[in-house]
Amino acid sequence: MQSIKHDLYDAAFELCDMEPARDADRYNPEGSLYRFQDERSSGEYWAYFRDNLFAVNIFDLRFHASGTMRYRHTEHLCIAYYERNDLVVRGLPFSQGSHVIGTYVADEGGEYLARFDAGAVARATSITISPDYYRRYLLGRFGSIPDIRRMVALVDGSRNFPALVALFKRMREYRGTGIAAELFYEGAVAEAVGLVIDRANEIDLERQGGENRAAIEARHVKIPPARRISADDARSLEEAEAYIRRSPDARLDCRTLARIACMGQTKFKESFRSRYGCSPASFVRRVRMERAAELLSGTDLPIQQIAKEVGYAKPGAFAAAFSRTTGVLPSAIRASE
């Protein structure tokens, strides 16, 4: 990567009709501020770029007409704290909403696609890290590291992550300059990655029924190169994704989804993980729980009926899956209304 700004941001800013702005008094002067030039949108996007390694971002965007935002990107990872996010981003099942951690696991040559309605808002603080950061910088420093892409995907949708939220708020408020800023942002990004690894280990521990924590943390692997996905395979995966979202109550095992994507099961699983950062089964579970949360908070349907709507014949199995994914029981969602 030449630089994260050149390889990832410049083209996106151009496609979104955003240009540099001078009056950046409300932000750290070490970064750069951009504003929409299109009257259909308004708002600001501030970014601090560190060579080919990472960027720190603060944005508050408003869309006055419905539309889409789409562009091709290089491989990268994004971790954000959304104060509010009305955008519906393909491949991100949980990050829509308010006060939520949203992550994006991007493949080389992949397409970012977000849809929004008139009045939509996207307000967040985030970090973007390049493969040079997690494949070269971290690997060169530590020798072996966890699968960062997988771990970033695992924490998407977290709503109880106070340490990471507090860190993002410190990034938003920081005004230091010079070498102090370089040290602060470098440390903040490293701290954010460390918090994500720790939370992902906790999620693994919960899902594996109490397996020894040290054993989980000891699973350090060298990150393999990302699998390159052809345009045809990407479209096939999107068909499978659309089916999952359209039919959360259907049979969604790997065999069924691979058949929809016109792939063998092994290729389907490998390609799916490369594109979405998680296994098909994990993605299905998260989409189902997202739909369940919508039904719990937005309808009066009995929990037993909601369980059937998202593919669970037994309410007990649904409650257990919902609790593992969200940290609360379905009844707690109803009780909080």
Image: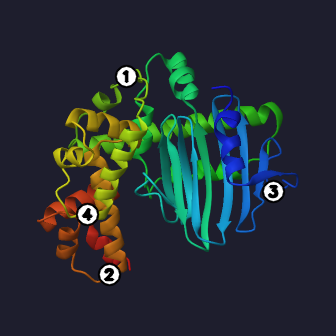
Q: Are marks 1 and 3 in contact (CB under 8 Å)?
A: no
The residue wearing badge 2 is 299
The residue wearing badge 3 is 26
63 up-or-down from 35: above or below: below
Q: How is the image coloured?
A: rainbow
State the image quarter where residue 323 is shown: bottom left
216 up-or-down from 40: above or below: above
| Disc on the earlier residue, 4 or 2 | 4
**Which disc is residue 84 wearing?**
none
Label 1: state its secondary structure. Answer: loop
State the image quarter where residue 296 is shown: bottom left
3D distance between C-alphas at marks 3 and 2: 41 Å
Label 3: state its secondary structure. Answer: loop
3D distance between C-alphas at marks 4 and 1: 35 Å
Q: Residues within 10 Å of mark 4 (few under 14, many from 20)?
A: some
| Residue drawn where x is 83% and y is 45% of the image | 29
**Which disc is residue 247 wearing?**
4
120 up-or-down from 139: above or below: below
Instruction: Tell which tag, 2 or 1, sits nearer the viewer.
Output: 2
The residue wearing badge 1 is 221
